[in-house]
Amino acid sequence: MATPLLEARDLVKTFELVGETVRAVDHVSLTIQRGEFVAIMGASGSGKSTFMNMIGCLDTPTAGQLLVDGIDVATLSGDALAEIRNRKIGFVFQQFNLLARTSAVDNVAVPLIYAGVGAAERRARATATLTELGLGERLRNSPAKLSGGQQQRVAIARALVTEPLMLLADEPTGALDSRTSHDIMALFQSLNSRGITIILVTHEADIAEYAKRRVLFSDGRIVEDGPVTARKGAAN
């Protein structure tokens, strides 16, 4: 049997607030295989974003074990963790997080700088990725000269340019109108059809319907985990 891409075993994350211990993630176990498209849902404070930060190796569990591509991340040095984040995981955020005075192609090339890729190859790969996502004519545009949907496509291209094993998308449509949100989610479906694993955090039920599997958090625990039966886009 193939090694799971992501395996959380009894994960716990606690915070100390005003002398009280708050358990944001409460003994969560979850396995995600390569090629899945998973929507993680829950109300504000349910633990979904804290869980996302842990599986993205941005935060450390208080207890439990996390394996990414079969590697126990607790055994890794800071440099090795950074390499996993840069090479195995692509991040997409609600607010795009693009460099304001930098062109689309140079924004996309940023992760390749940290990966030690030479300038010519960086530009070639960034150009190819943007072109693939429909922005071949916008390479030199700064974020201010792009629409919200175009900015999110640049952010997705930046996440894809290192050819990661999975994309982690945290409320990627939160700053977009409904039509643009549909376009972005259709893009995620297309990427997933090519075998890219996508893990999406959202509080919107209609956005979760683009995924294949839904995991529902409440009070730091998983209360539902199953297939999305009424999928959007896939049958259209």
Image (tube, rainbow, N blue to C red):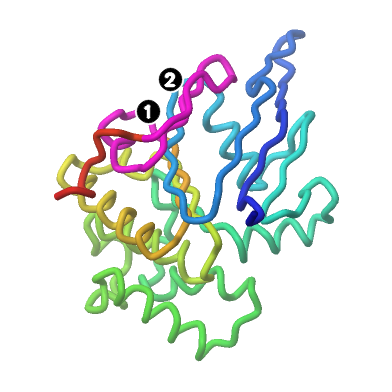
Which residue is found at the position 77% from the left and 49% from the top? 73
Q: Which is nearer the N-term, disc 2 or disc 1?
A: 2
Task: Identify the residue at horizontal 37%, vertical 42% (top origin).
Answer: 212
Horizontal side of 96 relative to 122 (left or right) equals: left
For the residue pair 206 and 233, the one nearer the viewer reads as: 233
Q: Position of residue 23 (x, y in %)?
A: 68, 17
> Residue at label 1?
203
| 115, above or below 95, in the image | below
Q: Amino acid at mark 1?
A: His
Q: Residue furthest front?
A: 1
Start-end of magenta stretch? 202-227
- Nearest to the observer: residue 64 or residue 202: 64
Please check the rendered image and state whether residue 210 is part of the magenta-colored stretch, yes or no.
Answer: yes
SS for dot 1: loop
Q: Amino acid at mark 2?
A: Ala
The residue furthest bottom is 120
User: Could you say which disc has been placed on residue 43 in the image?
Assistant: 2
Q: Nearer the viewer, residue 150 or 103?
A: 150
Q: Are marks 2 and 1 in contact (CB under 8 Å)?
A: yes
Find numbered disc 2 in the image and state the secondary structure of the residue it sits on: loop
Label 2 – label 1 distance at C-alpha: 6 Å
Q: Determine crowd level at label 1: few under 14, some 14-19, many 20+ residues with C-alpha closer than 10 A.
A: some
